[in-house]
Image (cartoon, rainbow, N blue to C red):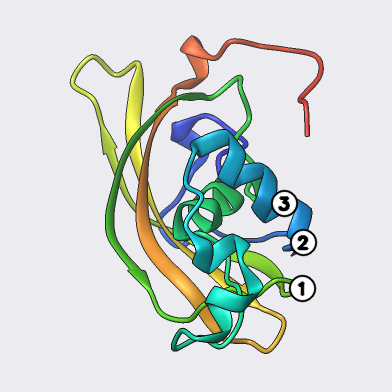
Amino acid sequence: MISKPFEDIRVGDTETTAWRTVTEEYVRDFAELTWDRHPLHLDPEYARRTRFGERIAHGALMIATLLGLVELHPAYLQCFYGLDEVRFLAPTRLGDRVHVVSEVVGIRPRPDGEAAVVTCRGSLINQDGATVFTGLFSLLVAGRAHAIERQEVAR
């Protein structure tokens, strides 16, 4: 999504990411990290009695997964600016594989010209082609003259 200065980003630019498998360990680690230990995510017996019939991943974990899968180069990404119109359309079940399809839908340069708010529509898609969730993600992106260069990008 963000791999270059805002001057080189265009409305309509798209990205499709690699796949990630949602494992039991991934869900359990997120539950411990966030203290969100709702039994829908952790207790198979409880989850069987819900409308989903089995454990599902946290919605917040799926948002974090989207942000982890897309390219957010530290030379250009200054900060996460906002999240709008998020809709969870399907549950993510343990064992599902997901990837991201995103598109730049807006670019608003700041008055100082140093950065722009870049808004992307991001969708997390599962292995069956179902959209798990979608939303607008706004990011503050540096211009060419204000990038902070770095040799390595941790992935």
Q: Is residue 143 above or below residue 96?
A: above
- Expressed as whole percent of the image width and height from the top left, the position of residue 40 reads 51, 68
Give the tally of numbered discs: 3
Q: Nearer the viewer, residue 32 or 140?
A: 32
Q: Which residue is denoted by mark 2 in the rendering?
A: 23
User: Is label 1 in a helix, a strand or a loop?
Assistant: loop
Mark before the other along the chain sequence, 3 or 1? 3
Residue type (three-letter) at the residue carrying disc 2: Thr
Mark before the other along the chain sequence, 1 or 2? 2
**How far apart are the alpha carbons under marks 2 and 3?**
5 Å
Q: Quadrant of residue 57?
A: bottom right
- Badge 1: few (under 14), some or many (20 or more) residues near its Cα, within 10 Å? few
- Expressed as whole percent of the image width and height from the top left, the position of residue 95 reads 77, 73
- Expressed as whole percent of the image width and height from the top left, the position of residue 130 reads 56, 86
- Badge 2: few (under 14), some or many (20 or more) residues near its Cα, within 10 Å? some
Q: Nearer the viewer, residue 133 or 58?
A: 58
User: Is label 3 in a helix, a strand or a loop?
Assistant: helix
The label shown at residue 46 is: none
* Outermost residue to the front: 45
